[in-house]
Amino acid sequence: MIVVMKADAAEADVEAACAHVRALGLVPHVSRGLQRTVIGVIGAAGERPQIHSLEGFRSVERLTEVSRPYKLVAREAHPEGSLVAVGGVEVGGREIALMAGPCAVESRDQIERAAEAVAAAGGRILRGGLFKPRTSPYSFAGLGERGLEFLRRAADRHGLAVVTEVLTPEQVPLVEAFADLLQVGARNMQNYALLEAVGRASRPVLLKRGLAARLEELLLAAERIALAGNPNVILCERGIRTYETATRNTLDVTAVPALKELSHLPVVVDPSHATGRRSLVGAAACAAVAAGADGLLIEVHPDPARALSDGAQSLDFSELAALVPRLVAHAVVEGRTLAPDRSRLDAATWLR
Amino acid sequence: MIVVMKADAAEADVEAACAHVRALGLVPHVSRGLQRTVIGVIGAAGERPQIHSLEGFRSVERLTEVSRPYKLVAREAHPEGSLVAVGGVEVGGREIALMAGPCAVESRDQIERAAEAVAAAGGRILRGGLFKPRTSPYSFAGLGERGLEFLRRAADRHGLAVVTEVLTPEQVPLVEAFADLLQVGARNMQNYALLEAVGRASRPVLLKRGLAARLEELLLAAERIALAGNPNVILCERGIRTYETATRNTLDVTAVPALKELSHLPVVVDPSHATGRRSLVGAAACAAVAAGADGLLIEVHPDPARALSDGAQSLDFSELAALVPRLVAHAVVEGRTLAPDRSRLDAATWLR
Amino acid sequence: MIVVMKADAAEADVEAACAHVRALGLVPHVSRGLQRTVIGVIGAAGERPQIHSLEGFRSVERLTEVSRPYKLVAREAHPEGSLVAVGGVEVGGREIALMAGPCAVESRDQIERAAEAVAAAGGRILRGGLFKPRTSPYSFAGLGERGLEFLRRAADRHGLAVVTEVLTPEQVPLVEAFADLLQVGARNMQNYALLEAVGRASRPVLLKRGLAARLEELLLAAERIALAGNPNVILCERGIRTYETATRNTLDVTAVPALKELSHLPVVVDPSHATGRRSLVGAAACAAVAAGADGLLIEVHPDPARALSDGAQSLDFSELAALVPRLVAHAVVEGRTLAPDRSRLDAATWLR
Amino acid sequence: MIVVMKADAAEADVEAACAHVRALGLVPHVSRGLQRTVIGVIGAAGERPQIHSLEGFRSVERLTEVSRPYKLVAREAHPEGSLVAVGGVEVGGREIALMAGPCAVESRDQIERAAEAVAAAGGRILRGGLFKPRTSPYSFAGLGERGLEFLRRAADRHGLAVVTEVLTPEQVPLVEAFADLLQVGARNMQNYALLEAVGRASRPVLLKRGLAARLEELLLAAERIALAGNPNVILCERGIRTYETATRNTLDVTAVPALKELSHLPVVVDPSHATGRRSLVGAAACAAVAAGADGLLIEVHPDPARALSDGAQSLDFSELAALVPRLVAHAVVEGRTLAPDRSRLDAATWLR
């Protein structure tokens, strides 16, 4: 922590700030520049919340954080990237994990068909929502519990792992029984009761970035899960809210390498929510792979025109099948694999 | 709902879109302009989520919502403003409700002193957090349950009502037993389980706008509370996240009149979180009153320099006492009252 | 300038950074914390742009500016607020300057009627655009030169000063001959050739904040004008671009007190562009006065429904006349005046 | 144009709006839904700016644009992509154009070394600023005119074309004499005098997206250049301003495919300004290629630690050389070429 004094701070003001620092058991280290005096605070300032009240001192210009506020998820704590096992799939390693499926599980038949198409395209993890957090209370809210079984069976039949969203702490035990990966949605990134509940769960967690979350806040949310006991967190960039209205959100693609510098956790990208438009999903997914993403979360639907939610951003099966070889080839360029079981999808074929 | 076709849409494309509309039990109404054809959708499109999949049609440029997606909280449904009773205070009427207190209840003594100062300044509702949603898991998280009693007693002793934040559905019965007004914080504006829990509560709700929430999304969150059975919702503008870094958030002061056009619910402003800086709180509070706010939520602390949270944005007691007459005078200009029991604070005195 | 080293920076890395600092003629001052080492840079770092390349050093986490990059416009350089004379009106003093008029001068008759109404309402400065920077090249671009004379004559007939926008350096001499205050629009806030041209002009400058400009950037643009020789700059907050779509822009009302802390320059507010909606202009204007604005720039038009530009955000004459007493009363609360020549508009009348 | 009436609009209100439409020579087409009436406006509404004043009518909820406001640059007007010739390089075709060089030309030697490295890496166009628009008036502002000759000679010696920024209309003839491509910077995207000047120039234009510009606004700026007579415009995404502070700007990578849907103009990406951090430039550049960019604009410097500007985001020569094969391989995946003269850089080599 560094305390920047105002240009007109008097000696007594500097001393008052130092006294406040000392009173908290920390050590001030004064450095006088030509225009401003700054005070370095030595010691565990992070454990002394009262230090922030210095910002209210009339002679203090501002406080600047020097240390990072997260520890467990920091790259510094764990220089090599973490591997997170999801069912039989390892996320964060050489393989880029392809996760796909419908926004919402709508029926046994729909998820069965989706699972088949996802597996055929080389996907490894089946997605599908049962409890849908919809902005409007009048929108379709998901099948709930009975859909979980449809989802699990469809996945099992096609050798896929399962990711699905959990909305409340109470749902965790139920969802854990059916899913391999628990998704915390963007709206819940700072729902601390939920973070703590998944932090006590036995399954890994897919943590989506909030709509207006800074990378540091995303990492602090991950830290909370890790601190509660679950180190198996996968971060997910899914577009942020900006002033631009041409796309649903703005894909912050460089968040991928930036997060990987800051943290050892795997980072995946959801190009469907990031763009909101089917015609842009492919380009966004390729960009994510090229930028170093460890996985993709793509919405597909047997018949997007009849989807009960997110039809506008869902690929149909043939679009997914057509996209995968392009993704595979970009993955190969990055020294990685994607959909590795499908030998006919290799880059050589694509590039020929 | 209006469907805007692309400029190059053929007759068959228009017909396909119309067929999709009809298949959902709705009526298409085609209007051909010089450059584009648009299709008006007549009927309850809001109850047909599949309508949105038209956005995925290759010949469709975009969909435009015509109706408002919320009903219960819309001004149209209730042209006069609602009054929400909080303890003995009526919010939304002629009096502008002054709510103040510390960010967090830290001790029996601290909240007692705060209650005394708030009452002396003309405040009507005492605030104080017990369960603090902190971005960092290492920050002070509040006293929890035992603090509720301190808060209630301090308020009672000084004739104040109580507002405090509730973080989870489970906490609702407990907090309801102690508080007159249940606060849903900005991070939880789209925590639907919590919205539904407070929607079943017997106390009114103070709903804070999410950090990146559009007004429509705030109103849809309020709609969810109302739909669950609790029509007594007070909206709170508390600053939004923008690119500007000079203030903690950006106070969207015109959200006050804009919300009041759209909805009949009372709207209050939190100038402390909106600015994050003690020196700006006064100006922000006055601006809110001048813009038509129905209440203010201001952080005060007996000793901001020792506050365990938000010290930088907390006023001390003398600052609060000095601000109130200025607020009263602006209220009078707007034909309203503030701190009405304190006759010596009237505008005549201030303006003399 | 402070250099924050990465947590894993070795002694040699710190030394390399110090060597870079010294090579630029500056003095490094090393401070070692528990987790990070920081280097204070002593000397005129602002004159050594190469210092920024430290951000590219692999062991450097980031650089933090300690000094403010502007000097002439800083409050520190001039603790009392500046007064800027515009025709016979002093902006920045006790009187809040009311500037009003149409978005664009459309005809001799239109501006004549507007001037009459502005003067009758207590306005002091007449606005009206001749050279309109329109986003679309197909929009009405203004009357150009011949309209300047209409504007000047209308103003003179009613005892008003004139403010109008200047779009290019070449227009400065022409506009200077007719106007008392040269407006630099939001789109041109970083058009440096224009800033330098108005910096050499003999008239004061109204500098509008760019759509996505930070306060520091606005002040640096003002600094450039001052550095070119013209210290008479009035800053104008006119709404910033955010994710919110309910209003045209988001009025950053606390920018007013924040700018006044940082700078001695007067700050005015344009509630018309900030909101884009006639029904919100009044509330925005009152909020601006309550927050400490030194002036208001309001769009009015004899017949907004026939306006060639910005009709949706223009008040008609009766709306302006009705708003002024409310503004006057808020001004009085703040210890100021507005429209002082109009004794019947005083707060006493309004408040009675 | 569609006029959405308020839910409580009476028949007379609808008629008043229709009358306004008719008075402008346009035809209203009324469509009545269950909740709202909408009026389609048939005719060339874009040429009747007064239509917008309907937004100020009390019974009008809002106006919705149906047609696109730009014509010349619209994809609809020219379904195939445009090719823009820059010196001997064709931008917008199969080859992805690599443009690189220092932020600013600092000396004859520096630009000579940069040109050599850029050519060796397979670059086709040399960049280098002479007139630098710096936020602070105290920053290095470029060598100006004499540097143009250094830049041209260095480029010629290595078979490169030249792109450089032009800041004012007056500089256009001078810069045109030396450069193959005239850059309009982000700060000047809405400097209309400059847009018109480059619109009359004989060289193609590289138009950078403004910091807070919507895609539509970028296209309207391009339209203005085309309308002034110069159809040879290349659009450049260079990061937008958002709330995120971990990177200098946020690269909006899906702007590339979104712009290409809307317009026939080539789209290039500047990964250096988009990220502001050397360590992220490579990932951003790869993502841009994968998303369909027609070119890249990358900052390189012989010695970033001594750069007079933008050192933190400049690659050194070995970093550039190492990046190119990766870019080439991603280009090949997209069915394109990059640095095609350098056969040793082909994807086969890279992928082996």
Image: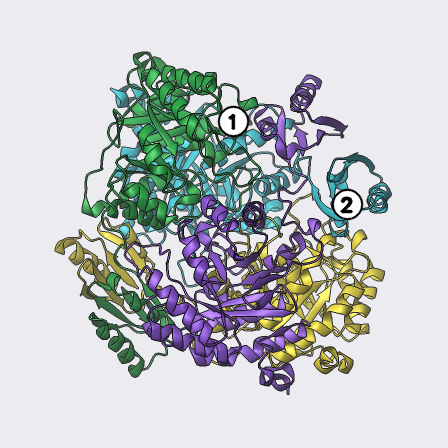
Chain colours: A yellow, B cyan, C green, D purple
Q: Quadrant of residue D5?
A: top right
Left or right, C330 with reference to D267: left
Q: Position of residue B285 (x, y in %)?
A: 37, 35
Quadrant of the image occupied by residue A253: bottom right
Residue D19 lies in what quarter of the image? top right
Query: Which residue is under mark 1?
Result: C279
Q: Nearer the viewer, residue A316 or A222?
A: A316
In the image, C109: left or right of C352? Answer: right
- The one of B112 and B340 positioned closer to us in this rendering: B340
Q: Position of residue C348 (x, y in %)?
A: 31, 15
User: Taking D106 as reference, is D40 above or below it?
Assistant: above
Relative placement, left or right, of D192 versus A313 is left
Label 2 sits on a secondary structure element that is helix
Q: Amino acid at mark 1?
A: Ser
Secondary element at image label 1: helix
Q: Is residue C186 above or below residue A183?
A: above
- Mark 1 to mark 2 CA distance (whole Å): 33 Å
